[in-house]
Structure formats: C-alpha cells, structure tokens
Image (cartoon, grey):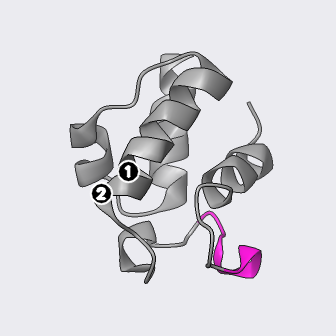
Amino acid sequence: MELDKFIKDFAAQFDDTDISEFTENTVFKNLKEWSSLITLSLIAMVDEEYETKLKGDDIKSSETIKDLYNIVKNRL
C-alpha cells in the first residue's frame, strides 16, 4: 500500500476541497468539508479499496491523513 494512493483515495471522498489541500500532514478534521457523511464514505472506501476495517474510534484518535494510513497499513 502506497501513501500517495491512500491520499488520493482519501481526497476522492471530498467534492469541494481542492486536491492540493491533501498531504500526509493534513489535519483532516480541520477541512471545511469534513462531516459525518465523509466519515462514513471514508470507512466504506477503506473497506472496498483495502479490504480492511476502519472504525469510528480509529478516526477519532487520528489527527492527520498519515495517522489513518498507518492504521490501515498495520491491518493489512
């Protein structure tokens, strides 16, 4: 699993946020478009693309996109 692909997959869950806003150090909860719907989309994307589970608690305990990436990577 590559970090760049994960960031692109993560960014694809957002409709109105420019792709340039997404880096490994992006604090995703500070993005204007962040919502509970995006959270559900993210959980579904991880399940479909990476065939592993991401839980709400994982998202709550994460600050950056890289934090989430590391959780997913460790479950593969």
* Residue that appears at 42% across and 22% down: 53
In the rendered structure, the answer to whether residue 23 lies left or right of residue 42 reads: right
**Relative side of 32 to 61, left or right:** right
Q: Give the range drawn in magenta.
A: 18-24
Q: Pick the residue in front: 11 or 41.
A: 41
Image coords of residue 52 (percent x, y): 50, 18
Reading the image, the residue beneath label 1 is 39
x and y percentages locating residue 69 in the rendered image? 55, 43
**SS for tag 1?**
helix
For label 2, the residue is 36
Please state which of residues 20 and 44 is positioned toward the viewer in this rendering.
44
Residue 74 horizontal/vertical position (percent): 50, 24
Q: Is residue 71 left or right of residue 35?
A: right
Q: Is residue 12 above or below residue 20?
A: above
Asked if 40 appears above or below 34 in the picture, the reply is above
Occupied quadrant, residue 76: top right
The answer to whether residue 40 is left or right of residue 16 is left
Image label count: 2
Distance between mark 1 and mark 2 Cα atoms: 5 Å
Q: Which residue is drawn at 56% across and 70% down?
A: 25
Looking at the image, do the residues carrying marks 1 and 2 touch, with CB atoms under 8 Å apart?
Answer: yes
Q: Which amino acid does label 2 sit on?
A: Ser
**Along the line of sight, the residue nearer the viewer: 75 or 11:** 11
Residue at horizontal 53 percent and vertical 72 percent from the top: 26
**Which structural element holds mark 2?**
helix
How many neighbours does mark 1 have within 10 angstroms: few (below 14), some (14-19), or many (20 or more)?
some
Residue 34 falls inside the magenta stretch: no
Residue type at mark 1: give it.
Thr
Q: Is residue 48 above or below residue 43?
A: above
Residue depicted at x 45% and y 76%: 33
Q: Could you tell me residue 21's position as x and y percent?
A: 65, 80
